[in-house]
Image: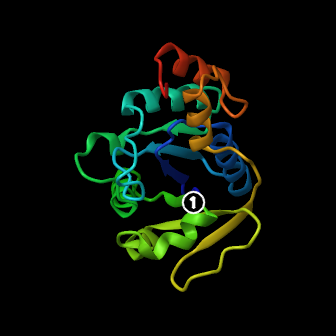
Amino acid sequence: MSEARKIAVFGGTFDPVHLGHVKMAGLAQKALGLDEVRFVPCRISPHKTGQVAPAPGDDRLEMLRRATADLAWAVVDDCELHSDETSFSYATAESMRVRFPGARLFWIVGGDQWDALPQWRHPERLAEICEFIVFARGQLPLPREGYRIRVLETVHPASATAIREALANGESTHPWLAPAVARWIAEHGLYR
């Protein structure tokens, strides 16, 4: 009997995707022998209500495609962009379970999101389906009863907010942007 496929979901606004995102996904892929990491840009983030709307979904998808073009294990998945609803992780995980029966599913989060997880909508439903890959920046995340967790460590100073601010202030590129992503942003006048 063959081993179940190992699929990790990496959700977020990816506004824009930066090299820190790609680094985290690559570390997870290597550390856990993942068959694929599915980058899932959200349509409406429940964690960012009341903030400036992200770049259009089609642009964020294309930036993800460009950032991951050379990574055989990376898949850009637009499943959340087709919904009129807020993007809730538990619903995406339930959808993944139907789409990939028998797969071993993982959910990638940063330490800050792990700490905020109790405030998410139905985190227990997400935990029933997925093992969590938690990226710690310094302090190790505390375990939670009923939650399977794998802790990985990484340090990177990338910030999508800082990148957007730099571009809005006239920078044409940023050191944490893949060149192909920076070109797309410039060609389409994003974040100006």
Q: Looking at this view, name the residue that lies furthest to the front.
A: 169
* Mark 1, other Cα within 10 Å: few <14 / some 14–19 / many ≥20: many
Comparing 126 with 119, the one in front is 119
Judging by the rendered image, the residue that carries numbered circle 1 is 109
On screen, residue 178 versus residue 75, left or right, reads: right
Q: Nearer the viewer, residue 186 or 50?
A: 50
Viewer-proximal residue among 166 and 132? 166
Under mark 1, the amino acid is Val
Residue at the spot x=56%, y=82% of the render? 144
* Residue 140 in the figure: left or right of residue 112: right
Q: Position of residue 167 (x, y in %)?
A: 58, 28
* Image coordinates for residue 132, horizontal then vertical, percent: 57, 66
Residue found at the far bottom of this picture: 145
Residue sitting at x 67%, y 49%: 24
Q: Give the answer, above or below, for where 1 lies relative to 176.
A: below
Tag 1's secondary structure?
strand
Residue 55 shown left or right of residue 170 in the figure: left
Give how far across and how far down residue 146 sits, in percent: 51, 83
Q: Residue at x 48, y 57 (%)?
A: 103
Q: Is residue 61 above or below residue 7?
A: above
- What is the total number of numbered labels drawn onto the structure image? 1
Please say which color scheme the image uses. rainbow
Residue at the left extreme? 84
Image location (x, y in percent) of residue 22: 65, 40
| Quadrant location of the N terminus in the rendered image | bottom right
